[in-house]
Amino acid sequence: MTELAKKRPEFRNINAFKDLTTYRLPAAGWVSILHRVSGVLMFLLLPFVIWMFDTSVSSEISFAKFTAAFNAGLGFVPGWFFKLVALGLIWAYLHHFTAGVRHLWMDMSHDAVSKEFGKTSATATLVVSLGLTAALGAKLFGLY
């Protein structure tokens, strides 16, 4: 055996409390995990999306009810909570869309895929999705 092979640590049993807390996930790993999380979030919030669509296009009265739910609340649920759920849905859609475009681009251009491209495209995905979410969230909460 070489000297380098002897110095390498050998992990047989990974301790979740000691080893996983020190592991740094690369940006591409975060994008991959958040892509799955955003897909699950959109699926779970599908009844909320259907309710929003139904109440916003049924009639003028239901649209007034829809806007009142976001401003004053509905029942015991305050309006800021509806806005927060809508903001989560906005983030989920934007992140899922931008990560999906990233995956499609990597699938179409196999020659251009490298470790550096994966890192920069993952960082760009995070920046674009969070930036667009912040802009739409500012509009949702009435900052402009």
Image (cartoon, rainbow, N blue to C red):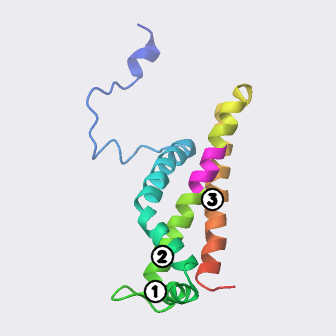
Name the residue at 25% across, 30% down. Answer: 13
Q: Residue furthest front?
A: 59
Image x and y of residue 97, in percent: 61, 52
Residue 97 is one of the magenta-drawn residues? yes
Of labels 1 and 3, the one closer to you: 1
Picture quadrant of residue 19: top left
- How many other residues sit within 10 Å of disc 1, few (<14), some (14-19) or many (≥20)? some
Q: From which residue to which does the magenta span run?
A: 95-101
Q: Is residue 88 left or right of residue 6?
A: right
**Please, what secondary structure does the residue beneath circle 1 have?**
helix
- How many other residues sit within 10 Å of disc 2, few (<14), some (14-19) or many (≥20)? some
Q: Where 139 sits versus 37, above or below?
A: below
Estimate the spatial distance between the alpha carbons at disc 3 and disc 2, rounded to whole Å. 17 Å
- For the C terminus, the quadrant is bottom right
Q: Amino acid at mark 2?
A: Leu
Do labels 1 and 3 touch, CB within 8 Å?
no
Rendered image: mark on residue 129: 3
Which residue position holds label 2? 84
Which of the two discs, 2 and 1, labels the residue nearer the N terminus?
A: 1
Which residue position holds label 1? 79
Picture quadrant of residue 109: top right
